Image (cartoon, grey):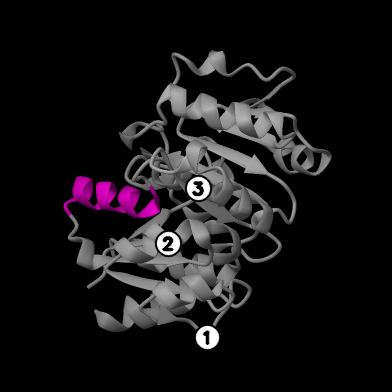
Amino acid sequence: MYKLIATDLDETLLNDDHEVSLKTKQAIYKAQEQGIYIVPCSGRAPGFLANLYDELHINDDHNYSILANGSIVIQNKSEAIISATSIPFENGKSIFTDATEKGYCVEVFTPKKVYVFQVTPDEKERLFSFGNRMQFVDDTDYSIFENQEVLKILIVKEGGIPEFQEYEATHTHVFEGKVCVSYSSNRYMEINPLHVDKGTGLAALAKHLNIPIEQTIGVGDNFNDVGLMKSAGLSIAVANAIPEIKELSDVVLPYTNNEDAIMHILEEYVFSKK
């Protein structure tokens, strides 16, 4: 029986209105009653999911999240760290300097705060609701991170993934062999420590909980879910997933994120297997 469901959020658990439907919530509550862990597996930073935790009844330290694309695994309530890996300072500085010189909006994730540089109006509107966990910075001085753990660097441009892919391919001196690069939501280039992704986060959490990796399910839709698809005992792509994720997954659902995909997964692969 599967004991842990690690699910991506945007375009997977959340519908296009960034909500979890009542049907899916009810299925999640039922799974929890059976001792199943429902684990957000997201590119977001710690402190950015409190409302979702409340909605899903996982706002306590018996529940966990895999965040910053696997760079950090935490207990939900206290944010106590189960595992964390950071980008070495010189690697981060090189990427940050190159990206800011090109004029990109850049976000730097630490365990307690996200620092935003050269913010665009669209991105500022998206981030405004996160309150004091965001810090908008006027200069582009990476030295403030010399004594901080940098979990992830996010480079932002609306519709920018093809441009970012070319950027990565032509700047191997910046990225290759130094960091792990992925993409999401048609606007984010996500940079993690080398050999770190959602799959390594899942493996760390499963080990912490003494759950065999074979008893885990990973659900995703986009490039930053590749590691999750490769690591989970059962990998499932939602119907709206990109072709690359469908190709990697064990199962491709006929249901999109707008059609209660997570509810259907629980009914098919958890409740019916008791």
Q: Residue at x 21, y 67 (%)?
A: 214
Q: Is residue 181 left or right of residue 194?
A: right
Query: In the image, 196: left or right of 53?
Result: left
On whether residue 159 falls in the magenta region, the answer is: no
Q: Secondary structure at mark 3?
A: helix
Residue type, mark 1 in image: Pro
Report how far apart the C-alphas of labels 1 and 2 lie in the structure: 20 Å
Between disc 2 and disc 3, the foreground one is 2
Q: Which circle marks residue 226 in the picture?
A: 2
Give the alpha-carbon distance from disc 1 to disc 3, as whole Å: 27 Å
- The question of residue 206 being in magenta is answered with yes
Q: Vertical placement of 262 versus 47: above or below?
A: below
Mark 2 surroundings within 10 Å by alpha-carbon count, few (fewer than 14), some (14 through 19), many (20 or more): many
Badge 1, how many Cα within 10 Å: few under 14, some, many 20+?
few
Q: Which residues are the magenta region?
A: 197-210
Which callout, 1 or 3, points at the residue further toward the start of the chain? 3
- Prevailing secondary structure of the magenta residues: helix
Gap in angstroms between the C-alphas marked 2 and 3: 24 Å
Assign a secondary structure to mark 1. Answer: loop
Q: Which of disc 2 and disc 1 is earlier in sequence?
A: 2
Residue 254 is marked as: 1
Provide residue 184's location: percent of width, then percent of height.
59, 56
Q: Nearer the viewer, residue 95 or 71?
A: 95
Please tell me which residue lies in front, 37 or 141: 141
